[in-house]
Amino acid sequence: MEKIIIYGDSNIRIEMALKSFYDNELENIKISPNSQNALNEIKNNLLSNSLFGNKKIVIIKDFNKFKKKEQEEILDLIKDIYSENVDKIIIISNSKIKFKFDKEIQCMLPKPWEEEKWIDYIKEISKFFNKNIEDDAIRYILDVYGTNDNYLFEEIKKFSIYSDKDTITKKDIEEIGFAYINMDFEEFSYLLSSKRKEEALEIAKKYLSDTNFNIIFLLGYLFKYFFDLYRVIINIEQKKKYSWPEVQRISQITSVSKLRVKKFLGVKFKNEKRFYANHAMLYSKGAIMDIIIKIEEFDRMAKKGEKKEIILYSLIENICG
């Protein structure tokens, strides 16, 4: 009987890891703190032996949500237990537990700025759906749509169904498209960071009138956008004008796309009619970090069910003044 812990802050990674242990010939018993008489259910499944009973995997979900006393009781119970009917005991937790398991699987999300780890993570998801994915396609997803892992999982699932090739390409993504393909988050983010309040409010109204709009996706996108701005600002000398070679150099140092660096630094080509605001003159390092912290606060509010209208308009007011 194998004792396994799967822990971390990525629900998607946890579910992928958990599914790798499923066996069609075994019964999968899932018990969580929300189950009726959860502790008794765990005991009954672990302690009852039957000569003709089906072999099973006992999965204890959301271990961290059990009361402290219940957690100790569960760990004491599985410490020396042996059952002919139980093939595996799997504990799911958001953090590591001090206990000797036969196998420990860590399922952490990369930090928002760890681009190479996000690339590896997206490849992991693609493999889960028996697909490969090109690096260009991954960078396109991350650059344009941010790092919400639940959303990425659903989108890659969609690509794996509709793509008739073994490898998902950037072209596939552009052709198959996203649920909010007409919502230009990049443009909205730029209007915000340029403090163009009235134009940002106009786009916000369009978002709120669209049933496909998800405030959590937008906040994830904005977090990455302003973190990219922070990485650029801490790597430059503040001045009124920058050149294209400087854009290329900063992009290489920071791993922020040239297009974003170009707009952040107010650089435009001769044939361009659009004006780009030099963000180095608009923000200090501290001011950008304050915005990032505020976006995290709004994200927590959104996940607790706060109205998206309140969050979106408060966000615009906070950044644009």
Image (cartoon, grey):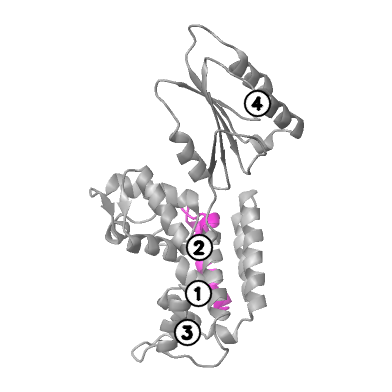
- Spatial CA span between label 3 and label 4: 63 Å
Q: Is residue 134 above or below residue 163?
A: below
Whether residue 213 is visible here, answered yes or no, is yes
Q: Secondary structure at mark 1?
A: helix
Q: Which range is magenta? A: 192-217
Q: Secondary structure at mark 3?
A: loop
Task: Say which residue label 3 marks.
Answer: 276
Q: Is residue 195 magenta?
A: yes
Task: Say which residue label 1 marks.
Answer: 190
Cβ–Cβ under 8 Å for marks 2 and 1: no
Q: Earlier in the sequence, mark 3 or mark 4?
A: 4
Question: Which of the two marks, 2 or 3, is nearer to us in this view?
Answer: 2
Q: Amino acid at mark 1?
A: Tyr
Crowding around mark 4 (Cα neighbors within 10 Å: few <14, some 14 to 19, many 20+) is: few
Q: Amino acid at mark 4?
A: Lys
- Spatial CA span between label 1 and label 4: 55 Å
Task: Say which residue label 4 marks.
Answer: 79
Q: Earlier in the sequence, mark 2 or mark 4?
A: 4
Crowding around mark 3 (Cα neighbors within 10 Å: few <14, some 14 to 19, many 20+) is: some
Q: Amino acid at mark 3?
A: Tyr
Q: Secondary structure at mark 2?
A: loop
Residue at 48% from the left image edge and 86% from the top image edge: 266
Q: Earlier in the sequence, mark 1 or mark 3?
A: 1
Q: Position of residue 27 (x, y in %)?
A: 47, 20
Q: Position of residue 161 (x, y in %)?
A: 30, 44
Q: Is residue 117 above or below residue 29?
A: below
Task: Say which residue label 2 marks.
Answer: 114
- Spatial CA span between label 2 and label 4: 37 Å
Question: Which of the two marks, 3 or 4, is nearer to us in this view?
Answer: 4
Q: Position of residue 129 (x, y in %)?
A: 35, 43
